[in-house]
Image (cartoon, rainbow, N blue to C red):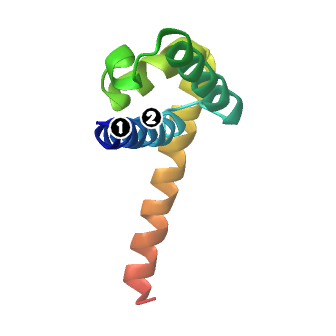
């Protein structure tokens, strides 16, 4: 019986680690999210799970969707908008640079 408990605990731990890793990556990809936001969000999730004994998936659902909600909650709207505008400009410059390289045969 103890072996089954260890197997179950290991599976729960692996699921928790996978959820947290995906959440962190998806959160970091959101406009305006910096290291401080990711660290705060991870701290919040970890504390909640420690206090309640819940798994992150049980408490917060899909990590991708929760990352979007968390970014909306923790990142000021003006900073997120500025980051989105910046991303659009960078993408446009990269596109032009790529086309120029294609034309020049580089």
The vertical placement of 33 against 76, above or below, is: below
Q: Name the residue: 51% across, 57% down.
A: 93
Tell me the crowding category of disc 1: few under 14, some 14 to 19, or many 20 or more residues within 10 angstroms, Cα based: few
SS class, disc 1: helix
Q: Name the residue: 43% across, 71% down.
A: 98
**Residue, disc 2:** 23
Q: Is residue 86 left or right of residue 22?
A: right
Q: Name the residue: 50% across, 18% down.
A: 49
Q: Name the residue: 66% across, 34% down.
A: 34
SS class, disc 2: helix
Query: Between residues 19 and 11, which one lies in front from this camera angle?
Result: 11
Where residue 50 sits in the image (x, y, percent)? 55, 17
The vertical placement of 90 against 77, above or below, is: below
Location of residue 43 (image quadrant):
top right
Q: Please identify, in this view, whether the residue under mark 2 or under mark 1 is nearer the observer.
A: 1
Where residue 9 sits in the image (x, y, percent)? 39, 36
Query: Between residues 95 and 21, which one lies in front from this camera angle?
Result: 21
Distance between mark 2 and mark 1 Cα atoms = 31 Å
Where residue 18 sits in the image (x, y, percent)? 40, 43
């Amino acid at each position: 019986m103890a072996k089954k408990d260890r197997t179950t605990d290991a599976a729960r731990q692996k699921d928790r680690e996978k959820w947290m890793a995906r959440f962190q990556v998806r959160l970091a990809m959101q406009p305006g999210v910096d290291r401080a936001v990711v660290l705060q969000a991870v701290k919040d999730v970890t504390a909640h799970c420690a206090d309640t004994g819940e798994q992150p998936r049980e408490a917060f659902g899909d990590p991708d969707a929760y990352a979007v909600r968390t970014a909306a909650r923790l990142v000021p709207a003006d900073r997120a908008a500025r980051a989105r505008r910046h991303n659009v400009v960078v993408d446009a410059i990269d596109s032009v640079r790529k086309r120029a390289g294609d034309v020049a045969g580089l």
